[in-house]
Amino acid sequence: MAVASDPNLAIEALKKVQGFCLPMTIKGELKTGSNDKVYVTAQAIPPTADGMQLRVVGIEKVFDIFHPISRPDQEGKVKEMRKTLKKQFPGLIEIRNIDDMFINDQYTDKPVILGFKFSANVAVPMAIKLRDVSDIPTLDEQSMPAVCKI
């Protein structure tokens, strides 16, 4: 699909949307110019006077830094990154496996979680998740745009 392979095509396609009629979530990867990967999650919310709205509700950054269990030589990088992130995000919660849904369900009210992606194929990269934990309005019949009601 062309939209998935070229982010500019995806953005141009979204600009043509007249309104979101159902609750939906859009996920994508940002190109950063580094080996770190950044994934963004946006959610359709009720339109405002400015028109339809997408709200970023989550950002996940997967660092090019790996758990010492898979790469012992990276222990120093892991410690330094932890220190840096704790300064940047004072409320940061550390968990072992950032993709463990059972553990993550315990922290749904925490905006910043740091851990490792043990679900990765070969190595175990460090990752941080930033989440919007505020009460986000959702689309419903009353809030959907007029274009959806025809």
Image (cartoon, rainbow, N blue to C red):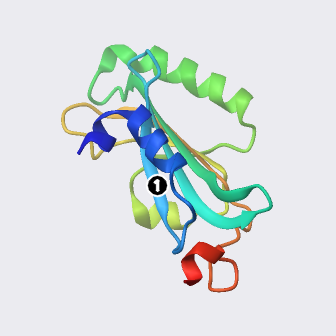
Category of crowding for the residue at label 1, using alpha-carbon neighbours closer than 10 angstroms: few (below 14), some (14–19), many (at least 20): few
Residue 32 coordinates in the image, percent (x, y): 47, 21
- Total number of numbered discs in the rendering: 1
Say whether residue 1 is left or right of residue 25: left
- The structure residue drawn at horizontal position 38% and vertical position 17%, both measured from the top left corner, is 74
Instruction: Residue at 74%, 62% (x, y): give it.
Output: 134
Q: Nearer the viewer, residue 28 or 116?
A: 28
* Residue toward you, 56 or 52: 52
> Would you place residue 72 above or below residue 18 in this image?
above
- Name the residue carrying label 1: 26
Give the secondary structure at mark 1. strand
Residue 29: image location, x then y, percent: 42, 37
Q: From the image, which quarter does the N terminus lie in?
A: top left
Q: Is residue 33 visible to the viewer in this orientation of the structure?
A: yes
Percent coordinates x, y for residue 88 in the rendering: 72, 29
Q: Is residue 121 above or below residue 64?
A: below
